[in-house]
């Protein structure tokens, strides 16, 4: 029985992650993303319409400072290129894109040596999203709103691959064209590939 408990404790100790990044370290990354099947949900007057957008690309960059071992906090920016959406909302379709500026937290785990990956990490984003909207009827505008993102990634030899789910919330504030109570939600799932620089 004691041997079984000792073996179990040893297995847990060996499987537990160790600190992957030391306190005080800094890093930056640049990445290219591919947005998979984004959706736009439109809410107004008790109705809800959902429009499928075309897939598109994004460019991003992040900077992190490790306040604690294994926990980085930082700033990031993400530019999502405009993509078409279908005429399911009754407004002639159009184009949508976003620029997101956010605070980020990055908990990092280190895996055992001689594996396919060096590190596994998680991501949390909270910030400002600036949505670009171009209507099929010929008018366009930009609106700001809340941006949220959550994801996970892996690293090998400073090359990073991430899966990120993000949401942009915004309202249209032009009562001359739409009612004030119309709100919009853009949901996106992205695969990001990039390179990390350590300082």
Image (cartoon, rainbow, N blue to C red):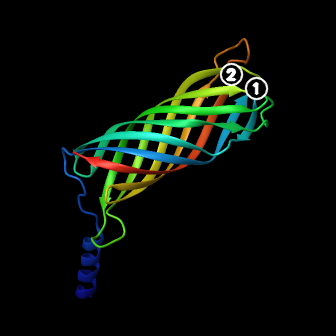
Q: Which of the 4 quarters of the picture holds residue 102?
A: top left
Residue in the image at 26% along x and 82% along y = 7
Residue to which mark 1 is pinned: 45
23 or 78, which is in the foreground?
78
The numbered mark at residue 181 is 2
Q: Is residue 194 above or below residue 140?
A: below
The number of callouts visible is 2
As drawn, is 50 to the left or to the right of 169?
right
As drawn, is 59 to the left or to the right of 30?
right
Residue in the image at 31% along x and 66% along y = 111
Q: Is residue 179 above or below residue 21?
A: above
As measured in the structure, the alpha-carbon distance from the residue carrying label 2 to the one carrying label 1 is 7 Å
Residue in the image at 50% along x and 47% along y = 33
The quadrant of the image that shows the C terminus is: top left
125 or 190, which is in the foreground?
190
Instruction: Find residue 125 and report its horizontal and vertical position in percent.
Output: 43, 40
Residue in the image at 61% along x and 37% along y = 186
Instruction: Find residue 142 and report its horizontal and vertical position in percent.
Output: 59, 22
Question: Is the residue under label 1 in contact with that under label 2 (CB below 8 Å)?
Answer: yes
Instruction: Find residue 168 and report its horizontal and vertical position in percent.
Output: 56, 35
As drawn, is 46 to the left or to the right of 63?
right
Considering every residue shown, the one lying at the far top of the view is 176
């Amino acid at each position: 029985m004691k041997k079984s408990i000792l073996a179990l404790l040893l297995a847990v100790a060996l499987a537990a992650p160790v600190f992957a990044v030391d306190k005080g370290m800094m890093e930056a990354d640049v990445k290219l993303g591919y947005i998979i099947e984004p959706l736009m949900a439109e809410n107004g007057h008790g109705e809800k319409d959902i429009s499928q957008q075309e897939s598109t690309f994004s460019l991003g960059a992040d900077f992190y400072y490790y306040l604690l071992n294994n926990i980085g906090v930082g700033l990031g920016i993400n530019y999502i290129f405009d993509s078409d959406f279908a005429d399911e909302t009754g407004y002639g379709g159009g184009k949508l894109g976003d620029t997101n500026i956010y605070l980020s937290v990055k908990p990092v785990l280190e895996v055992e040596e001689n594996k396919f990956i060096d590190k596994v990490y998680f991501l949390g984003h909270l910030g400002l999203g600036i949505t670009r909207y171009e209507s099929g009827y010929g008018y366009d505008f930009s609106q700001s709103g809340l941006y949220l993102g959550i994801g996970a990634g892996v690293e090998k030899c400073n090359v990073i691959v991430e899966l990120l789910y993000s949401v942009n919330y915004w309202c249209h504030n032009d009562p001359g064209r739409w009612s004030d109570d119309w709100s919009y939600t853009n949901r996106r799932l992205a695969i990001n590939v990039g390179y990390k620089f350590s300082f």
